[in-house]
Image (tube, grey):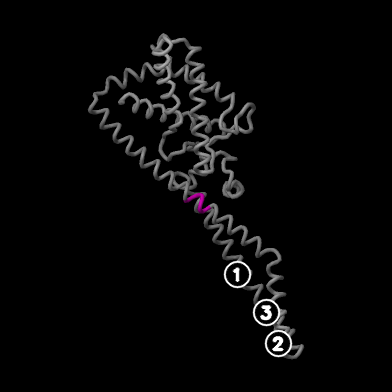
Amino acid sequence: MINILWYFMIYSIIGWMIEVSYHAVTMGKVVNRGFLNGPLCPVYGSGVLMVLMVVDLCGEWFGFETDLSRAKVIELFIIGIIFATLIELIAGFLLDQLFHARWWDYRDRRFNLNGYICLEFSIYWGLGIAFVLRVIQPVFENIVSSIPVRISWILLSAFYLIFIIDIVLTVLTILKLNKQLEKMRDMEAAIQKLSGSMSEFIGTSTIKTVEKINESQDKVEHAKDELKEDIRDRIDKTKADLEDSYKHLRLMIRYQRIFGMGRVITSISKRGNKMYQDILDKIRQ
């Protein structure tokens, strides 16, 4: 159990470092692309951990070599492709269904499955897993085994407590973000409605009511002009208030870049939200 907990944490941290480095090179800036606020990418830890367990099971069931220093690289490569890709598929699907967002999206790459996985990155997974298991894992096995059990439990308890808190805070932040994006969409719809034919519609309806008043024609015309002006002023003020609220909400979300909703937006794929993609694009501009 101690080994499992250590390996998950170690490879989640390494995965986060890989993600940050990859996007620093491809995007030219440092972005926390992980699901969580902290320096962890659980999909990496889960992928490596599953492959380690599969290697042990394959060794027991089929007589394969479980000593990683002597295991065949091609076997590790194939196991890495299959099971690490499976983890990526499950994680991508669950995140999309639960939060309506994608933290990675392969729809612009060939041989992809609904954008969750693709052949190119599955090959990268296989190569990475083979390298990790043959070169890196034996080093971590020695390090983990050298840590006294009591110290391991103390350190792991602290790490996983922070990990759980981070998960809770991140989930709450994403749920709040979705509510704010829905609010912004409602504001946009209201602003567009006010900018359209609403003014003329209200003015015409009100004027018809005035025309029914038994007054002279001059008074009716004067009342029409006053009502038109008053309606325009009210609509303009309402529209201005909505636009100010919209801008304030947009800036508030955008500039929470280290923690909060802004960080979540930067971590989501460019086309990663099927419900509020149009709003996200405007926030990113």
Residue 227 lies in quadrant: bottom right
Residue placed most toward the observer, 242 or 79: 79
- The residue tagged 3 is 227
Q: Amino acid at mark 3?
A: Leu
Task: Give the x, y percent position of residue 63.
Answer: 41, 9
Q: Which residues are magenta?
A: 176-180
Which badge, 2 or 3, is on the more N-terminal residue? Answer: 2
Residue pictured at 61% horizontal, 62% vertical: 190
- For the residue labelled by badge 2, is the local secondary structure a helix, a strand or a loop? loop
Cα–Cα gap, marks 2 and 3? 14 Å
Which badge, 1 or 2, is on the more N-terminal residue? Answer: 2
Q: Amino acid at mark 2?
A: Ile
Cα–Cα gap, marks 3 and 1? 15 Å
- The residue tagged 1 is 237
Residue placed most toward the observer, 113 or 272: 113
Residue pictured at 31% horizontal, 20% vertical: 143
